[in-house]
Image (spheres, rainbow, N blue to C red):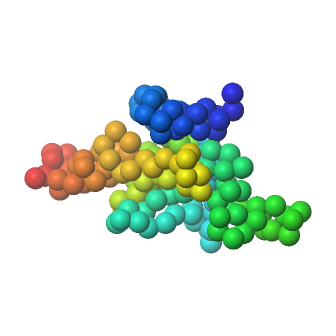
Amino acid sequence: MAEGTALSERIAEQRVGGGDPRAMLGELRRALVLVPVDGGGLWAAELGGVRWVCGFTDEAALARFAQARGALHDPDAGGRVWEFAELRGARLLDEVIPAMGVPAGLAVNIADPDGSMFFPPVTGIVPDAVAVDGEAAVGGVGPGGERER
């Protein structure tokens, strides 16, 4: 089973009320996620005070996003090829999102209304230090490593 397919299946299970959220998150962490690159940075959108990195489980999901934005992902049909980075979900959640310096999460397959999933910047998904309900929400960690309140 392809990595993106396994993540897509876990998302589908979750969307119909089944599945295990921890298993879905584990699958995301193991999966290779395609993230469009725009102007040298990863494609992200602001919504509700959160910067959402847009990631896709496979090139077909990325192509649906490109088509929804009025651009084809098929150079043979006169469209442009969208450049993308291929990153492990764990790297996105543990390194890339914390480095953004603002509340940020991951939006997966956003062009698929029945197959999208949002992974918000909360404890258990992103590191506590950048989670909106973790250390960052209560003042962070002081210079000696103690929690500030």
Q: Residue drawn 65% across and 64% down? A: 68
Specify whether residue 51 is in view.
yes
Q: Residue drawn 21% across and 54% down? A: 137
Tell me: residue 120, above or below residue 28.
below
Residue closer to the observer: 46 or 143: 46
Total of numbered circles in the picture? 0
**Could you tell whether 44 is left or right of 143 in the image?**
right
**Could you tell whether 14 is left or right of 115 in the image?**
left
Q: Residue drawn 81% across and 61% down? A: 74
Residue 30: give x, y in percent of width and height.
55, 34
Specify whether residue 29 is in view.
no
Residue closer to the observer: 18 or 136: 18
Q: In which quarter of the image is residue 146?
A: top left
Q: In which quarter of the image is residue 32?
A: top right
| Residue at the extreme left | 149
Q: Residue drawn 71% across and 56% down? A: 63
**Could you tell whether 79 is left or right of 8 in the image?**
right
Quarter in which the N terminus is drawn: top right
Residue 104: give x, y in percent of width and height.
40, 57
Residue 35: give x, y in percent of width and height.
61, 55
Residue closer to the observer: 70 or 38: 70
